Image (cartoon, helix red, strand yellow):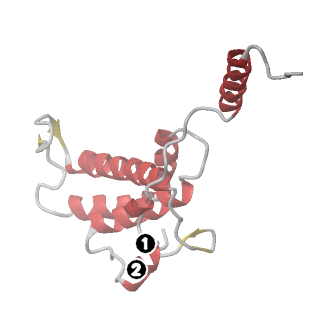
Amino acid sequence: MNRAPKRPWAIAALGLAALTLSACERGPAQMAANGKICIDFKQQAKAPLATGADGAAAVDQCVMRWGYSLASSRDDADLVAEAAAAACGAQLSRWNQAALSQPGGGEEAASLMTGESTTPLAEHNAFTHSRALFYVVQARAGNCTPPPVANGAPEGIAAG
């Protein structure tokens, strides 16, 4: 007696339906992480940290470390970047104070990026927020390891 199924296409269709349903349970397709874009904080620790003399570097170091540290949050990247920028308010303030102490430091001028009228303080703020967003997205895209933490803050950030 031959017990082979008379409708092999029905079995194939059921198998395809099962595969489709199991794919739905996994949620939306996830892109693979690209760890090659991650910052190596072990190498960063060997390099001298930015001091107050270079305001842009100090702000960049701060938002990089906070951006990577907060990137694992489930909030939107914009909100996480805003938090990273807020954590670096002291560094931004020092940079702004240094700019204001320069002759013409608070005067309006045309932005080199947009051509619109702007001030150094507005450009510093824009830099801080754009770098913070970049680091959050970079850390998420690479599934990167955050820097070590000491006393509730990423290591390497000067006290506010």
Number of numbered discs overlaid on the protein picture: 2
User: Is residue 42 or residue 15 the one in the foreground?
Assistant: 15
Secondary element under disc 1, as helix, strand or loop, is loop
Label at residue 43: 2
Q: Position of residue 57 (x, y in %)?
A: 30, 67
* Residue behind mark 1: 40
Q: Where is residue 35 in the image (x, y as percent from the top left)?
A: 45, 61
- Image side of residue 68 versus residue 23, left or right: left
Q: At x 74% / y 14%, what residue is drawn?
A: 7
Residue found at the very far right of the displayed protein = 1
- Image side of residue 109 versus residue 158, left or right: left
In this rendering, the answer to whether 63 lies above or below 47 is above
Other-residue count near label 1 (Cα within 10 Å), few / some / many at <14 / 14–19 / ≥20: few
Task: Please state which amino acid type lies under the numbered disc 1.
Answer: Asp
Secondary element under disc 2, as helix, strand or loop, is helix
Is there a contact, CB below 8 Å, between mark 1 and mark 2? yes
Q: Where is residue 137 in the image (x, y as percent from the top left)?
A: 43, 48
* Quadrant assignment, res 20: top right
* Quadrant assignment, res 6: top right
Q: At x 71% / y 19%, what residue is drawn?
A: 8
Task: Please state which amino acid type lies under the numbered disc 2.
Answer: Gln
User: Is residue 87 or residue 38 the one in the foreground?
Assistant: 38
